Amino acid sequence: MTSTAQDVGSLDATAVAAALDEADCGTVAGDAGRRAQYSADASNYRRIPLAVVFPRERQHVLNALRVCRRLGVPITARGAGTSTSGQAVGPGVVLDFSRWFNRLIALDPQARTATVEPGIVLDDLQSAAAEHGLLFGADPSTHSRCTLGGMIGNNACGSHSLAWGRTADNIVELEVVTYRGTVVRLGEMTRAEIDAAVAAGDDRGELIAALDRLARRNLATLRTQLGQFPRQVSGYALEQLLPERRFHLARALVGSEGTLAVVLSATVRLLAPPPARALVVLGFPDAGAAADAVPALLRHEPLALEGLDRALTDIVTRPGTRATIDTLPAGQAWLFAELGGPADALPRQAEALAATAQRAGCTGHEIVTDPARARGLWRIREDGAGLATRLPPGTGAEGGAEAWPGWEDAAVPPDQLGSYLRRFTELLHRYELRGAVYGHFGEGCLHVRINFDFSTEQGTAVFRAFLADAARLVAAHGGSLSGEHGDGQARSALLPLMYGPDVIALFEEFKNVWDPDNGLNPGMIVRPLPVDGNLRVSPHRTPLPLATVFPFHADDGDFAKATRRCVGVGKCRSADHRGDVMCPSYRVTRDEKDSTRGRARLLYEMTQGEVITDGWRSTEVRDALDLCLSCKGCSADCPVGVDMATYKSEFLHHHYKGRLRPAAHYTMGWLPLLARLAARVPGLVNALASSRLAPAVKRLGGIAAQRDLPRFADQTFLTWFRRRTPQGDGRRGPVLLWVDSFNNHFGPEVLKAGVAVLEHAGFRVRVPDGTQCCGLTWITTGQLGIARRIARRTVAALAPDVRVGTPVVGLEPSCTAALKSDLPELLDGDEDARALADATLTLAELLVHHTPGWQPPQVEGRSLSQTHCHQHATSGFGADATLLARMGIDNTALDSGCCGLAGNFGFERGHYDVSVAAGEQVLLPAVRSAAADTRILADGFSCRTQIAQQTDRGGTHLAELIARALPPAGASALPAPSLPPTDKEHTRD
């Protein structure tokens, strides 16, 4: 048998990948791009694997183990890669179970069990269980993307483990395979079952015999040193081998971080949740005071008792979330207490808990009855791991600084939490470090991201010394280095500061019984790697000097720092639509390379120049960015503000500099200019686009053959506007209507409707002199030099109006977003560009917030609305929702994410299938199933085009909806044909 070493530097990645591919291991990838994508998890660590394997079935896993055993290659099993301790990265072969090995095998509602493959996402299991009124008890904040295999590896807990237990407490049985290929089914065992297994004399029997001997020799140690409180997760769970715990080998493997065996399937326990729940938010003077109140509040038996302090909430900048935070009860720290039970009993329980909190020093409380508000509050807590990676802005020189895991989730018995937290805060001050504290206060488990400086030798030395002192501190309080995220590389080397030599020796013996070749995730828990080895940011590695066009001020002008904003929490891998846009292409392909995180990983590795060696010319990065829709969803939805649309534009600018570009960059990127030329002979252009030559035209233009080309209007909006007579009294003064290229040339009726509405509201409508452009199409295709010149002209043309306070109203969300966000970045330091951004409003924002006394027309009926992804990222839908409510519209805002067309993306050759699949997830089925009298609202030209081309319905702009309901005097400026009922032909034309 080959003994596996941790050093695999002598092995050739290409040869390893070829051997795996020949052995039928599923999909095997050994290219530089894949290896870069899997080089990190959500921790501080970075290790480049030799290959990545995506098994589709059980036999693929067994085959991969056989090959790796023969070659002496270590294996790291991986789920969603959201581990914060470094145990999901390794130097050998990474097995990614999340993509295909993720089925729900069986669900028995009577027995309340489910059997799953390890790659199943927790929310998918929860959805299946919910159909039977059941759920899985452990619910970490990454529930929308974490896998059961990863939860088993780390013994994940979550907010409700206080009532429903950790992952280990909800495991019935595991089927696993060892590095040597022994497949074992594990569960609890009686003495008779143990003796029978040993007597069998097979590989399974020998394994059980060795484990039985280990347990029987060390009963006192197992009873007194391990399992002393629920969140004692560090090390191996050897207490599960005790006879009073029924020698539960499956639960003993939970939390072993993939170091003992690879999970093939898991049978888990399901439970019935209480019929109703209530959330009580409690304010306290500081986090220490909140911690002191925990023991008293636990007597009320809450389902969850979560805490967070002001340092975390101060980081939030997203308007909707910020509004939720600003209405929290008075305090500098808060506890979220969730109660469960019969609905009629919850108000009494909530008041009793609040009364106890008041006696314990609570400064204010709120009993939350609105489900939407409760979801918003829980979202803040769930986003903590991402939010905490940046210190609060405006806090001196350190404001907005990077913060890192490392001392991520230590836990102490709850009655020790107040003391521990105060001494931990003192420790931070002594090392001149800062971090935002939050976590599972009810179980004494704290999360914190700290502003370690890994870029210098001194900062790394401080990191090392701080961890050692923090480990001693938590041990002095009877606590655990890890409360749910596992030890990994972050804490394994610190275990001797928590456990005595006898326990450490037991851990090594346990590992040797299972994995004598050290082939599974070596360096974790036993024979550990140093805490400061393999750091993702290191003083020994100098990033490539990459000059950028965008300033990246939030990251000190450092593109490498911008790309490492992605700390791996993986929210972009969420497949469910919960009001988020990111990441549309990942939701279609479920491939890591198509996630925001996967792209950010590649871009970061490009800045390092090791795996991705050709910088801006990298084909691996280009290919990974190909399916990025530039939707800007990540800029708002990613907790740390990764802005992949901007990164993509920056990359494309440099990648194609001085080189021939894809044809679509010329046709779609230069669309505003080409449209002006086409507007001279629109009939001829439309005839050509619908003739037998259309396929050739599309092929030459890099346009998808399946796409219908939009038809040019017979008359542009600008031509119409300059010939018309203004209407209304203009009593509110001038407003500048931004004339975007899309609506000007393809949908002038939208802009005409906007004029009618603005004049009815009392504004005097003006349009920019000349033909101006926001430059969006050049930005998205990475033609930043041209985009900057266009932006300068536009800003100069609008500056006189903006300087005197004239608002600028945009009707096309993508162009409005470009004026608000892209232009000030492109023209960094230009005060007129910043003033233009501040002056730019959506129609709804102007009418709701800047038009006092105006009443919209009343419109009866229902509507479905599709929020454009750029509007989602910059302005949100709040003003639109308010305006629709004032109009009496019963609107349903679709939880659909991006429509999938996304400007040039859905028209480009090679993108059609992904584009349509993105729309088919929510938007298009919702449109098709909507009642005939339900209006389909979509302000984005792309959204309306996707709807028109993929359904038999059409989309209506908000301006059109209002204009059609105006009294005759207000609507007289519009010719009758421009206000037809919603239909497919109207939207196309």
Image: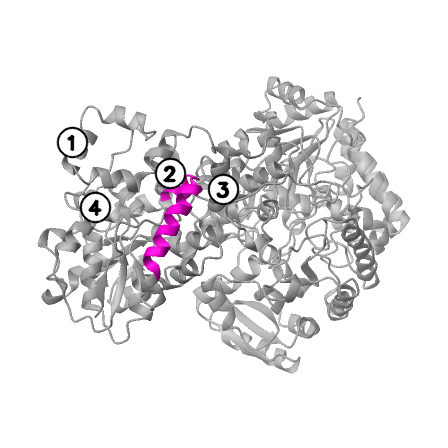
Evaluate whether residue 251 shows in this view: yes
Q: Position of residue 487 (x, y in %)?
A: 74, 48
The residue singled out by tag 1 in the image is 687
How far separated are the C-alphas under marks 3 and 1?
Answer: 37 Å
Q: Check if mark 3's residue and mark 2's residue have beta carbons within 8 Å.
A: no
Q: Which mark is residue 275?
A: none
Earlier in the chain: of badge 4 and badge 2, it is 2
Earlier in the chain: of badge 3 and badge 4, it is 3
Earlier in the chain: of badge 3 and badge 2, it is 3
Q: Check disc 3 and report its element: helix, strand or loop.
A: helix
Give the residue drawn at x 23%, y 38%: 677
Residue 72 position (above or below residue 592): above
Evaluate whether residue 961 shows in this view: no
Task: Decide whether residue 160 is among the magenta residues.
Answer: no
Earlier in the chain: of badge 3 and badge 1, it is 3
From the viewer's perspective, is the residue at label 3 or at label 1 nearer? 3
How far separated are the C-alphas under marks 1 and 4?
Answer: 18 Å
Q: Which mark is residue 987?
A: 4
Earlier in the chain: of badge 2 and badge 1, it is 1
Foreground residue among 544 and 875: 544
Q: Which mark is residue 650?
A: 3
From the viewer's perspective, is the residue at label 2 or at label 1 nearer? 1
Residue 365 position (above or below residue 771): below
Q: Magenta residues, as a range?
A: 777-799
Q: The residue under label 3 is which amino acid type?
A: Glu
The residue singled out by tag 2 in the image is 905
Tell me the quarter of the image containing the N terminus: top right
